[in-house]
Image (cartoon, rainbow, N blue to C red):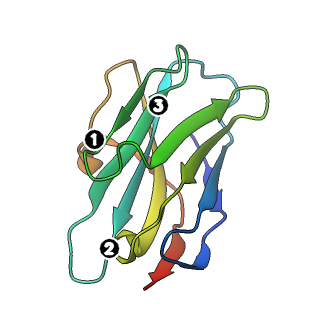
Amino acid sequence: QVQLVESGGGLVQAGESLRLSCAASARTFTSYIVGWFRQAPGKEREFVAAIRKNDGNTYYADSVKGRFTISRDNAKNTVYLQMNSLKPEDTAVYYCAARFGVAVSRQHYEYAYWGQGTQVTVSS
């Protein structure tokens, strides 16, 4: 089992930054993928970024590439999402999710473990 707890959401103005954290309980599992997804009202859940825990390889949606950075601290079993130059269209509930293995997926239904979500609101 993997338990995920997100933190760091909030209300910011366009152009500002936020850092989200995802703390995972699965200390004994070295090979898994952590992804960030987001869901805005009335829209489907969409992929934002992912990182492979063992080698740190990262993957991004085109809409956030160059603005968001995903990173990990294996000692703390935590994954971060640094979000810069935020836009109103980034407003959503952000979720972290985990799946075991080495294959990175951009499909939310391939992630078995999910956090509770954290709200990010960007005002114009």
Amino acid type at mark 1:
Glu
Evaluate whether residue 5 shows in this view. Answer: no
Give me the C-alpha separation between circle 3 and circle 2. Answer: 23 Å
Give me the C-alpha separation between circle 1 and circle 2. Answer: 25 Å
Q: Which residue is mark 1?
A: 110
Q: Residue 56, image x and y in percent?
A: 53, 21
The dot on residue 89 is 2
The dot on residue 51 is 3
Determine the residue positioned at 52% across, 39% down. 70
Label 2: state its secondary structure: helix
Determine the residue positioned at 58% across, 78% down. 12
Residue 74 drawn above or below residue 21 = above
Q: Is residue 54 left or right of residue 106?
A: right
Q: Residue 86, image x and y in percent?
A: 46, 66
Determine the residue positioned at 27% across, 41% down. 110
Q: Residue 33, image x and y in percent?
A: 45, 30
Residue 84 drawn above or below residue 106 = below
- Labels 1 and 2: the sequence-earlier one: 2
- Labels 3 and 2: the sequence-earlier one: 3
Residue 119 drawn above or below residue 5 = below
Amino acid type at mark 2:
Glu
Give me the C-alpha separation between circle 1 and circle 3. Answer: 15 Å
